[in-house]
Image: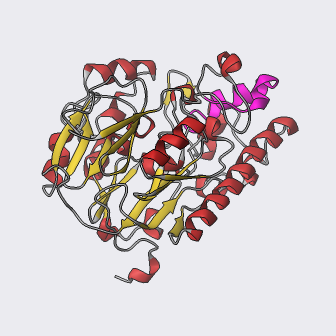
Amino acid sequence: MDSKKYKVNKVNAYNGWDPLKQVVLGNVFEPEFFEDIKDSKLRDLLQQILYETREDLDGIQKTLEDLGVEVVRMPSNGKTALGMTRQSSPRTINEAAEIGSLESQSVMQEGKVWGLPKPCLMPRDDFITLGDRILYTSHLWDEVIDQSSIFNPNCLDTLFQNEFDQYKQGKIKYGPLKPTDHLLKDETDYDGRYFDATFQFWAPLIHRVGNRLIIDLQDWSNIDKLLLERYPEFIGANVAMGGHNDGMMNLPKPGLVVCSPDLPKGYFDKTLPGWDVLRIEHPNYMKGDLGDWSKDKHITNGKWWTPEAKSNPELVNYVEDWLTNWVGYSEESIFEVNMLAINPECSLTINYQPEVHKALNKHGIEPIYCRFRHRNFWDGGLHCLTLDTVREGGIQDYFK
């Protein structure tokens, strides 16, 4: 096997703070992705989001490289990858089905379309480096990205791929994961996409602490058992937060937890005994480079924001109809928590807050701020945008 064809060949990461040597950074489609939209105002707004997002990603890449980190970018994969080269952007379910862009990337159920495939913007949502392997926890990018051009297959673990293939062939009804009542309730809100829950989970449900994995069991009752059987070099400790935990907690250095104020005092006493806990007591939930949207959150139900949504219902409707896979629930996100540690003394983040800056300084951490203007559209921070593939150091026990 010719290893030179791959950008990521060997990986090593047992925590999120050892000196960072290589990272995978997300990407977005080219602005031309939306060129066939006839409404010029809508088209220009969507293209502006893509252009400015790419511009900010380029800035993040430069910051990382200036710090001595090798950066591997996800491909931008535009229309050709989606089978849309000679077609107009779909306006109806029939048009979408005709161009084939929704066959496996989106769910057509009860007359609804679950949007266009998402760009490869947030690799950490679906990948996590566990020692010398990269665990891939989703199947959403199969047609958007040729993973073999990025990752050497020798270090890529597609956890439930075989079971998912059997499901598509009609050989099995459900996957190996056992959803809890909590997830089943949530899935009802998403038109009952139950099959997704039994084949995939979110990589941010796992935090690495040397030889220990902190695993969230709120949504899948048996995920810890499945993971520890597959990765016997680790032991497990469990929490129950739900959702993407890297918007609730971060471990920027050994002995320190940065977390949401929503987590009760004493929450980490068993999983991270003796560690200091820094709570973001007054997070800028709904503020950013593009202004405060707390008074206008009803326009998008708190899911996403860009200032143009306030005066452009066509934009809101288009996002809700076609880009539901692209956005999240930004109202709930705490971007001050969603940091990327370069080493135990330095972390990258995207949201400046004086109190947090001072508190991190007291713990010996110097934050470096990067611009990401449309974070409230994409619902992601520095940790989401990056996948740490190579860090110095090895496995160790931080709780002896």
**Left or right, 353 with reference to 134:** right
x and y, in percent, of residue 332 in the image: 51, 26
**Residue positioned 72% across, 33% down in the render:** 306
Q: Which is more toward the observer, 356 or 57?
A: 356
Q: Nearer the viewer, residue 142 or 316?
A: 316
Which residue: 59% across, 70% down? 66
**Residue 319 in magenta?**
yes
- From this viewpoint, which residue is outermost toward the right? 40
x and y percentages locating residue 128 in the rendered image: 36, 53
The residue lying at 53 percent from left, 42 percent from top is 358
**Quarter residue 85 falls in:** bottom right
Over which residues does the magenta segment extend? 304-326
* Color encoding of the figure: secondary structure
- Residue 290, compared with residue 297, is above or below; it is below
Q: Is residue 298 visible?
A: yes
- Image coordinates of residue 192 in percent, x first then y, are 39, 22
Q: Is residue 323 magenta?
A: yes
When the figure is inspected, residue 94 is found, relative to residue 191, above or below; the finding is below
| In this picture, residue 334 sits left or right of residue 376 | left
Indicate whether 105 appears above or below 23: above
The answer to which quarter of the image holds residue 114 is top right
Picture quarter containing residue 392? bottom left
**Residue that appears at 30% across and 51% down:** 254
| Residue 85 visible in the current orientation | no
Whole-percent x and y of residue 111? 55, 22
Quadrant position of the N terminus in the picture: bottom left
**Residue farthest along the front direction in this orientation:** 362
Q: Main secondary structure of the magenta part?
A: helix
